[in-house]
Structures are given as structure tokens and as C-alpha cells.
Image (cartoon, helix red, strand yellow):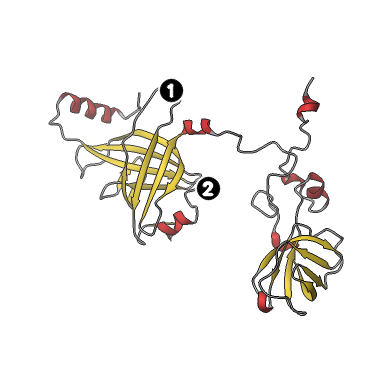
């Protein structure tokens, strides 16, 4: 049973008993982004106001019908959006917002809003569908199709979102790690490059292996702007995983960042960041856990 206001219940009862009663129905969509921000769009040719919120006339919206079933079978609703550069989210054109992953991990609530006529206030809404974005296809500069699946789709996930494993689930300097990359940046100069994968630098003070699995970004010369992963570091010599496009020359400058082995010992001893370590090194193996 769907909840609604007494006024809407009375209107629907009157409509059920007398089909000549005029009823205006508007489709409204509320997207909740991963940040918690909400986007409210009206599928009609006018803005829709209800309960202190306004659903703006945004992109052209069409959608597939909704089916409701008892059980665990997942219901899905496909939504087609048609737009131009005048349709924006936080000042960003919608096409660019979608392409940059702005709708990733978002949920969608679809409701039908009712009034006695298009020029009269909304007297209530009925929630029709709630789900999460599971697929984004046919994206382009003027069109996108979203597949929204109800929350039972989470039952199809084969593994937990976070795996229980000894190594950290974060990547060094990402949003979960919390460390600021610039705090660990070190500038240097190339002394020589014996081969395409070896760089002799003027780095000093770093212990061996400190920059293992790190990154180097060239800041001058023929490779300006190029970045490469560091395989190993010994004293002032860096070994790259992949060669740069052009040979390095003495005097070329660079910025280097340390890497992380994603172990608890490295997180604590190298970065002093144990509070944000997200590994599970103390879970016993199957053999150890067996009675």
C-alpha cells in the first residue's frame, strides 16, 4: 500500500468512481548523488513544487513502465535523458557531468505528483519506484540512457564491497588514505640515464626502497609532463617500470613521490598513517581457523 495525503486519497477515490473527474499527473525524479546532494527534475514542461521542494524542468525525460512483483526478482526502470548545454548540474553542463562520473553510486526516486489541473497546486505524490543506478549507456553530448534497478539488485553482488584481506584496500594518497601527495613530493635533477629504465639522480637522504612502487613526473626537457611508475630505488638510482618516450638528459628536472606496499608495517613506519589503514592482517587463514 502506498502512503499519500488525505487530499490525494479523496481525489483518487473520486476519480475511481467518476472518470470525468479531472486529474493532472506529473512525473518527478529525485537523484541523490554519492555526496548526498539531490537533483530534482520534472518530466513535464513546467516546474513542479511540492512540500517545500521544487522539481525543475531539466532534460527531456522518458522512461519505461514499472512492474511490481512479489519475491526477489529485480525490477528495472530505464530512463532516457535528452538535453543541451543549457541543462546543468552545479553549473556544469549535464553531458560533462555524466561523463565525469557525476551520477556514479547515485539513487533515484520516481514519484507521480497529482493536482486537479496543470495550473493548480500539487496536493500529493505517490512513490512509484526507488533504485540505484546500475548501468549508464548511450551517453553523448545530447542524450543518455540510465538503467535504474531496485535495491534488491544488491542481492546479486557476488562478494562484499570490501574484501577481507591483509593488504590495505586504499591506494596511497587517495581519498581513503587521506595523505596529501604534495607533502611527500621531492624535487630532483637527472644526473645521467645509463639506459631507458635507469635514472641516476641527485636525490639524497632517502633510504633504499623508499620510492619503490612510487611515481616520478618529469618537469622539464623532452619528457616534460610524463609520469612513470618506479620499480625500485637504491640510494640515488631509480629503476622505472616503463621507458619514457624520449631519452633523459642531464639537468632534466623531476618530482618524485614514494610508493606504498599496502602493508600495516609500511603504513605505520613509513607514513605514520595507521589510523587510515584498511587491511585485515589478523584474520586467520582457513587452516588456522579450522578446529
Q: Quadrant of residue 189?
A: bottom right
Position of residue 63 measured from the top left corner of the image (x, y, whole percent): 32, 42
Q: Which residue is mark 1?
A: 71
Q: Which residue lies at the image location 80% right of the left edge and 49% below the top edge?
A: 266
Q: Mark 2, mark 1: which one is toward the viewer?
A: 1
Hey, which residue is sitting farthest top in the picture? 291
Please name whichever residue, 241 or 129, is drawn nearer the observer in this view of the structure: 241
Please tell me how crowded label 2 is: few (under 14), some (14-19), or many (20+) other residues with Cα within 10 Å.
Answer: few
> Does residue 236 lie above or below 19 as drawn?
below
> Does residue 111 lie above or below 96 as drawn?
above
Are the two marked residues, 2 and 1, in contact with CB atoms closer than 8 angstroms? no
Q: Is residue 153 left or right of residue 224?
A: left
Q: Which residue lies at the image location 52% right of the left edge and 47% below the top edge?
A: 35
Position of residue 81 measured from the top left corner of the image (x, y, whole percent): 35, 50
Position of residue 10 measured from the top left corner of the image (x, y, whole percent): 24, 27
Q: Quadrant of the C terminus?
A: top right
Please name whichever residue, 86 or 77, is drawn nearer the observer in this view of the structure: 77
User: Total label count?
Assistant: 2
Q: Is residue 220 left or right of residue 15?
A: right
Q: Can residue 52 be seen in this snapshot?
A: no
Q: Can residue 113 be seen in this snapshot?
A: yes
Q: Which residue lies at the image location 52% right of the left edge and 46% below the top edge?
A: 34
Tag 2's secondary structure? loop
Q: Which residue lies at the image location 70% right of the left edge and 64% below the top edge?
A: 242
Tag 1's secondary structure? loop
Label ID, residue 35:
2
How far is the residue under mark 2 from the one under mark 1?
Answer: 31 Å
Amino acid at each position: 500500500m502506498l502512503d499519500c495525503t488525505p487530499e490525494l486519497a479523496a481525489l483518487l477515490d473520486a476519480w475511481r468512481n467518476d472518470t470525468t473527474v479531472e486529474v493532472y499527473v506529473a512525473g518527478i525524479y529525485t537523484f541523490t548523488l554519492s555526496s548526498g546532494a539531490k537533483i530534482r527534475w520534472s518530466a513535464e514542461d513546467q516546474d513542479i513544487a511540492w512540500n517545500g521542494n521544487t522539481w525543475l524542468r531539466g532534460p527531456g525525460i522518458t522512461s519505461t513502465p514499472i512492474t511490481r512483483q512479489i519475491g526477489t526478482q529485480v525490477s528495472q526502470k530505464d530512463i532516457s535523458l535528452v538535453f543541451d548545454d543549457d541543462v546543468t548540474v552545479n553549473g556544469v553542463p549535464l553531458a560533462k557531468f555524466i561523463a565525469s562520473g557525476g551520477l556514479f553510486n547515485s539513487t533515484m526516486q520516481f514519484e507521480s505528483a497529482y493536482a486537479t489541473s496543470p495550473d493548480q497546486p500539487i496536493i500529493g505524490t505517490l512513490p512509484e519506484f526507488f533504485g540505484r543506478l546500475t548501468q549508464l549507456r548511450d551517453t553523448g553530448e545530447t542524450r543518455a540512457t540510465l538503467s535504474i534497478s531496485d535495491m534488491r539488485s544488491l542481492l546479486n553482488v557476488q562478494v562484499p564491497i570490501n574484501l577481507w584481506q591483509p593488504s590495505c584496500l586504499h591506494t596511497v594518497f587517495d581519498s581513503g588514505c587521506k595523505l596529501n601527495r604534495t607533502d611527500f613530493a621531492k624535487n630532483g635533477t637527472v644526473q645521467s640515464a645509463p639506459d631507458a629504465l635507469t635514472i641516476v639522480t641527485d636525490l639524497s637522504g632517502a633510504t633504499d626502497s623508499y620510492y619503490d612502487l612510487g611515481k616520478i613526473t618529469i618537469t622539464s626537457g623532452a619528457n616534460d609532463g610524463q609520469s612513470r611508475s618506479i620499480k625500485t630505488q637504491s640510494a640515488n638510482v631509480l629503476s622505472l617500470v616503463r621507458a619514457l618516450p624520449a631519452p633523459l638528459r642531464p639537468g632534466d628536472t623531476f618530482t618524485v613521490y614514494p610508493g606504498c606496499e599496502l602493508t600495516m608495517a609500511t603504513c605505520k613506519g613509513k607514513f605514520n598513517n595507521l589510523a587510515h589503514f584498511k587491511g585485515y592482517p589478523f584474520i586467520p587463514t582457513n587452516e588456522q581457523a579450522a578446529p
